[in-house]
Image: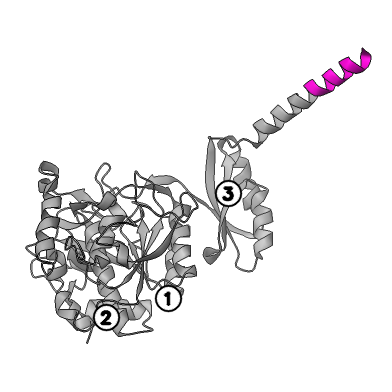
Amino acid sequence: MFRAVNRLGLLVLGLSLFAAASRAAAPSTDVTRRIVVFSASVPEAQRLAIAAQSGAVVRELPMINAVVIETPTSRISVANASLASRAEVARVDEDPKINWLKAVDAPGVDFALPSIPALLAPVSAQKLGAARAADASAAPWGVVRVEAPQAWTKSKGAGVSVCVIDTGIDRTHPDLKANIKGGTNIVAKTDDFTDDNGHGSHVSGTIAGTGAVNGIVGVAPKANLYGVKVLDADGSGSFDDVIAGMQWAVDHHMQVASMSLGADTGNQALQDAVAAMVKGGVTLVAAAGNSGGAVGFPGGYPGAIAVAASDKNDALADFSSRGPEVAVIAPGVDVPSTYKNGGFETLSGTSMATPHVSGLAALFIATHPGSTPDQVRAALQAAAVKLPNVIPEGQGAGLPLAPALVK
């Protein structure tokens, strides 16, 4: 009898301890992320060991000497103080989760603005696709405006690797799939970069749509596309998600990174990532933003090629952000392109202007192998024409034209 009771007591004690351990191991939903940046001389193993003392390690960002951690919000002050006391730690950056498709300084306005016709008649994009299927030479107006068809006898961007750091890409879209060569899902940490938002697929069509079925042909219709999903279905992601996508681009030797996303405020980690990408040989093309005010980030950082948006009349779009950081301008109003689930949509925004320039960069690199990001920027600006009725802060060097890039 005594032995039976003792065993029962041990069983109850064991279950209690297991439950307590399970509660301790269960991830808390009330956590805060931080990007812990170390001095460059600190070895990787030491970075991880120090970071792990203040939170659960989420991922490493070696190109900026950083480790991302999650800490219960109730302990964040203690964790920050502990990290700040370490000589090996250069700084600790905040790492909020935000919507990267909202316009800078204009809450509630998306980086990709549906056009009025698209809102009133959502089937119009499908009709557009059918019409282009009958005439595959009828490229979208923005592709025509940058004079891409005139450059295709010399280059269609074949062999150039362009990654779309965004919401993913529709991997089975008939006008995209032939050019999709790979990618990753940073958010879910898988290889499935399927687009559940539509934004990344729209960007991809402007860069390298094939026009194979519905005539949505991109600026560089032979470029290799890679989907780097850093944003969820709502367009949200943490700063470290976006930086991890930039890290992937460098690690996988991408030549162009198209980033039609932005934040109204950046942080030092994001700025360092832009510099590291350029140093790593990746040409970074980024949206200026849709606030009508200051340029957002990462577009506003040195090294990024910030793109403003023009309309069919060569006027600066009202929503387009402006400032000395703007490098060039490109078509960004009522731009038809591919969309998720095999669809098509007409959208407006600097998000739509950016991929025109990403495609132009691919055309240049294809005809000038080994070009550095600085050389690509210089070539885009040298190939640009000034739009007569647009202020300098709204267009930078002007509108780049493809023929001058493939000489």
Mark 2 — residue? 379
Which label's residue is closer to the chain start, 2 or 3? 3
Label 3 sits on what residue type?
Answer: Ile
Which label's residue is closer to the chain start, 3 or 1? 3
Mark 3 — residue? 69
Which residues lie in the magenta part? 1-12
Measured from the top left, where is residue 111 in percent x and y? 26, 51
x 47%, y 64%: residue: 248
How far apart are labels 2 and 3 at the CA level?
Answer: 40 Å
Near-viewer residue (139 or 393): 139
Classify mark 3: helix, strand or loop: strand
How far apart are labels 3 and 1 at the CA level?
Answer: 28 Å
Q: Is residue 52 above or below residue 364?
A: above
Which label's residue is closer to the chain start, 1 or 2? 1
Q: Is residue 71 above or below residue 274?
A: above
Q: Is residue 131 among the parts visible in the rendering?
A: yes
Quarter of the image for the C terminus: give it.
bottom left
Q: Is residue 306 above or below residue 93?
A: below
Crowdedness near tag 1: few (<14), some (14–19) or many (≥20) residues, C-alpha within 10 Å: some
Q: Main secondary structure of the magenta part?
A: helix
